Every structure is written in structure tokens, then in C-alpha cells.
Image (cartoon, helix red, strand yellow):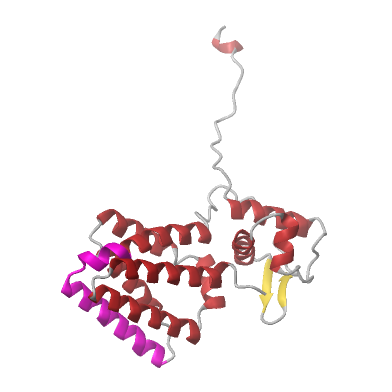
């Protein structure tokens, strides 16, 4: 076949696989734009909506966070979740090239949970006296912030990173830092606005004080169990708080 007879081919388009929260958000946006959920209407409760869509509540909550971040819905405190009256003119989902929000908050949380539980267990036997002192100093600064009713977010991050460093595993340290960097995004900011308060801060202080005792005793099973319980409690608050 001569070059002249060769058919023109379109440029190759690489399409990344859609993440679960994107698929759910896309379906809900289609229901909004199709008139099932009209502007200013209150969406069904999370339990009901998850059942109707046939998905888990954590997957639904993650999609709702993405939809709210994109300006399609809004949460009215004490009243529920509503479709915004000022919807974007064009569909937001599926996300266009260049607008990838990255792995979802639930996926990031699951990765942190696996890594940090393992790191806590290792840190109980590997942390040096100097590293334990650094963790205690960080906890003391967190306590002072909470007593002033100020957010301890900065020290919160530093504590977790220092704990993973105390496990003396460079791969864990690198991955956890990347996950905490991703935690600075807009979806996490929205979660923080919803879930962080004086009570959650105080619960975090209690957990960390108990963890410090396990580290001082070099009790690896206790450190692991405490971190698992912490992530279970926080995960419920973030992704399945009940109604």
C-alpha cells in the first residue's frame, strides 16, 4: 500500500481508569442534570442514597465530598445536603484531562492506615530515646494548642511523620510523607471542616498519650492495637458517621 493510500489515524488518546468516587459522582451529577435531583432540592440521606445506588456509604461519602468540592452540592448544617442553585454550566464529571483530583480520600486513608499501623508496631521496638522525646515534645505542643482551643493540625502531621520515621523504614517514611502532602488538598479541607473540633482534638490527645506509653514500654502489640483503633475511630468519623 502506498503512503498516499494509507488512512489517516487519529492521535492516540490515553484514558486513565475512573476511580470509584468519580464513577459515583458522575452518576449523581447525571441525576442532577437529568432532573431527578433539581436545584435546591434536598438529597436523600446517605444511608438511603447509598442503598438506592447500590454502593457502600464510605464510597458515597467520598463522592459527595468530590461533588461539593466541585460546587454541585452544598451541606447545610443541621438540615442536610442540597443541590446548589448555581450549578456549573457544563458537566464536571467525568473529570477532563488535567483535572485529575488524584486518588480519592478513602483510598489515601486506607494506604495511610496500612502503613502507619505497621510503622507504630515497628517504632515500639526501634525508636530511640531521642525520637521518643521528640514525639513527646510534639504531643506537648498539641496539648497546648488544644488548651487554647486552636487547631493542632500542624503538630498532628508532624507527630505522624515523626512516628513513621521512628520505625526506621525509609520506604514507609517516603510514602507517608507523600500521603500527608496529598492530605492538603481541597477534599481533605472539606472533611476537616466537617469533622475537626475540640472533642476530636481531645480524643486525639488521649490516643497519643496512650501510644507514648506503649512506645516507652516497647510494647509492639499494644502500639499496633492503639493505632488500629485510632484509624478505625477516625475512619468512621470521616466516611461513615451515621445519621
Does residue 11 show up? Answer: yes
Where on the picture, by quarter, is residue 119? bottom left
Q: Residue furthest right?
A: 35
Q: Is residue 85 left or right of residue 24?
A: right
Does residue 93 show up? Answer: no
Query: Total label count?
Result: 0
Where on the picture, by quarter, is residue 32? bottom right
Q: Residue at 44% of width from left, 70% of height from top? A: 229
What are the residue bounds of the magenta stretch? Answer: 120-148
Q: Residue at 36% of width from left, 72% of height from top? A: 157
Q: Is residue 154 left or right of residue 234?
A: left
Q: Residue at 42% of width from left, 79% of height from top? A: 204
Q: Position of residue 53 (x, y in %)?
A: 72, 56
Q: Quadrant of the N terminus?
A: top right
Examine the rendered structure and indicate whether residue 147 appears above or below residue 119: below
Q: Is residue 205 magenta?
A: no
Where on the picture, by quarter, is residue 218? bottom left
Q: Residue at 64% of width from left, 64% of height from top? A: 64
Q: Residue furthest top?
A: 1
Q: Is residue 113 left or right of residue 48?
A: left
Q: Position of residue 118 (x, y in %)?
A: 34, 60
User: Considering depth in this image, is 102 or 230 the residue closer to the camera?
Assistant: 230
User: Considering depth in this image, is 155 or 5 the residue closer to the camera?
Assistant: 155
Q: Quadrant of the C terminus?
A: bottom right
Q: Is residue 219 left or right of residue 150?
A: left
Q: Is residue 131 magenta?
A: yes
Q: Position of residue 13 (x, y in %)?
A: 56, 35
Amino acid at each position: 500500500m502506498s503512503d498516499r493510500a494509507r488512512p489517516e489515524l487519529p492521535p492516540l488518546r490515553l484514558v486513565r481508569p475512573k476511580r470509584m468516587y468519580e464513577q459515583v459522582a458522575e452518576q449523581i451529577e447525571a441525576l442532577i442534570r437529568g432532573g431527578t435531583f433539581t436545584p435546591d432540592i434536598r438529597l436523600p440521606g446517605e444511608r438511603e442514597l447509598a442503598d438506592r445506588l447500590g454502593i457502600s456509604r464510605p464510597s458515597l461519602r467520598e463522592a459527595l465530598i468530590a461533588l461539593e468540592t466541585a460546587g454541585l452540592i452544598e451541606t447545610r448544617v443541621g438540615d442536610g445536603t442540597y443541590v446548589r442553585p448555581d450549578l456549573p454550566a457544563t458537566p464536571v464529571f467525568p473529570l477532563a484531562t488535567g483535572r485529575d483530583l488524584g486518588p480519592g480520600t478513602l483510598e489515601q486513608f486506607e494506604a495511610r492506615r496500612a502503613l502507619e499501623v505497621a510503622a507504630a508496631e515497628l517504632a515500639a521496638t526501634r525508636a530511640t530515646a531521642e525520637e521518643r522525646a521528640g514525639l513527646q515534645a510534639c504531643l506537648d505542643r498539641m496539648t497546648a494548642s488544644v488548651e487554647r482551643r486552636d487547631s493542632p493540625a500542624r503538630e498532628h502531621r508532624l507527630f505522624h511523620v515523626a512516628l513513621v520515621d521512628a520505625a526506621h523504614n525509609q520506604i514507609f517514611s517516603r510514602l507517608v510523607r507523600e500521603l500527608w502532602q496529598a492530605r492538603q488538598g481541597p477534599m481533605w479541607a472539606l472533611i476537616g471542616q466537617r469533622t475537626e473540633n475540640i472533642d476530636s482534638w481531645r480524643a486525639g490527645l488521649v490516643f497519643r498519650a496512650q501510644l507514648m506509653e506503649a512506645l516507652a514500654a516497647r510494647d509492639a502489640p499494644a502500639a499496633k492495637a492503639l493505632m488500629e483503633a485510632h484509624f478505625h475511630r477516625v475512619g468512621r468519623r470521616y466516611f461513615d458517621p451515621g445519621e
